Image (cartoon, rainbow, N blue to C red):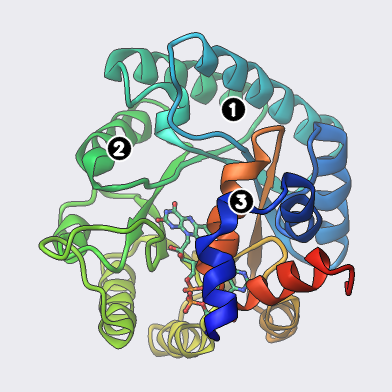
Amino acid sequence: MGLFSRLVVTCMPLIPKPVVGFVAKRYVAGVNLDACVETVKALNAEGAMATIDVLGEAVPNLEKPKEYVEQYDQVFEAIEAEKLDANVSTKPTMLGLNIDEQACIGHYEHLYEKAKQHHNWIRIDMEDHPYTDTTLKIYRMMLEKYGNAGTVLQAYMFRSLKDIAELPEGANIRLCKGIYIEPREIAWRDYQIVRENFVACLDKLFRQGCYVGIATHDDYLVHAGMALVDKYGLKREQYEFQMLLGVKPKLRKMIIDQGHRLRVYVPFGKDWYPYSTRRLRENPDMANHIIRAFFGLS
Ligand SMILES: Cc1cc2nc3c(=O)[nH]c(=O)nc-3n(C[C@H](O)[C@H](O)[C@H](O)COP(=O)(O)OP(=O)(O)OC[C@H]3O[C@@H](n4cnc5c(N)ncnc54)[C@H](O)[C@@H]3O)c2cc1C
């Protein structure tokens, strides 16, 4: 990353919100559900499945999760009414895990009931390490009680191989590198080590018979994933690749053209700003887009 790009990323909070919004458009399906439905229809038409995420993170009080729950209820209704090929992804802290575990579990019970009514399915995203144990605990509860549940493991965490060994039967796991900045004592930071642990985790998940969402835009890992699928002779229905909306659409097409199933993570909602700045910070190249937009060059 060039010095100027690095400066822009560091100064992100000072960049006017409309400029971030302009660049972020590719990562977020819009502010409302209608826009999200249109995005998912377009993805379905190109042969991709979707997972819909209502944008939001750690709530400030126990009223806020109720709003998110209502929005998810509407998402389930829209998926069924519009016959979308989509499930949903959720963040435990937006359902209150950062304040009250029992309240969070109550919201999940409601959402899993609702998903069942609409023949749908929910993945519980993995956030930063203070929530890893409780997220896995809630996942196990929901899997046991409702069945239509999946969660996420992060290849940068030292603990992930052990977590895989302890997964319940029938587990459905999205495997990703991990996006949060974790302490050195608990997570790998070296790029190649994280890749190698990703491959080790994926191998173990497949050996254990888990359904895996291979979530990455890293060509190296997409290749490694395809090689493992081949090694274990897996059928199309036993795994899927996953990518974020707006990231590497050419790779997405290549994966689909090779005959694999692929799901795109489609976030929408009014709380788009923190998500977008996180995505922009994650990919330094995007700083160039910001610079261009800032000076009216895009
Ligand atoms: C479907 C999905 C769900 C996820 N869910 C979680 C979760 O629950 N918890 C969690 O901690 N993390 C989650 N992540 C994020 C993940 O952990 C990584 O931070 C992220 O995917 C980047 O890692 P990568 O494997 O793509 O490799 P990288 O090495 O980061 O990226 C490979 C290449 O992809 C491109 N790229 C990657 N990210 C971007 C971007 N934002 N914008 C533009 N180009 C980009 C760049 O060209 C980069 O060189 C999820 C990712 C995906 C795809």
As shown in the figure, which amino acid type bears the numbered disc 1?
A: Ala
Please state the horizontal and vertical placement of residue 137, each as a whole percent of the image: 24, 34
Please state the horizontal and vertical placement of residue 29, each as a whole percent of the image: 78, 48
Which quarter of the picture shows residue 191?
Answer: bottom left
Q: Which disc number belongs to residue 115?
A: 1
As shown in the figure, which amino acid type bears the numbered disc 3?
A: Leu
Q: Tell me the residue that label 3 is attached to.
A: 14
Alpha carbons under labels 3 and 2: distance apart = 34 Å
Q: Tell me the residue that label 2 is attached to.
A: 135
Taking depth in this image into account, of 66 and 264 the one nearest to the observer is 66
**First of labels 3, 2 by sequence position:** 3
As shown in the figure, which amino acid type bears the numbered disc 2?
A: Thr
The yes-or-no answer for disc 3 within 8 Å of ligand 1 is no
| Residue drawn where x is 56% and y is 38% of the image | 121
Outermost residue to the top: 63
Please state the horizontal and vertical placement of residue 30, each as a whole percent of the image: 80, 43
| Residue drawn where x is 16% and y is 65% of the image | 184
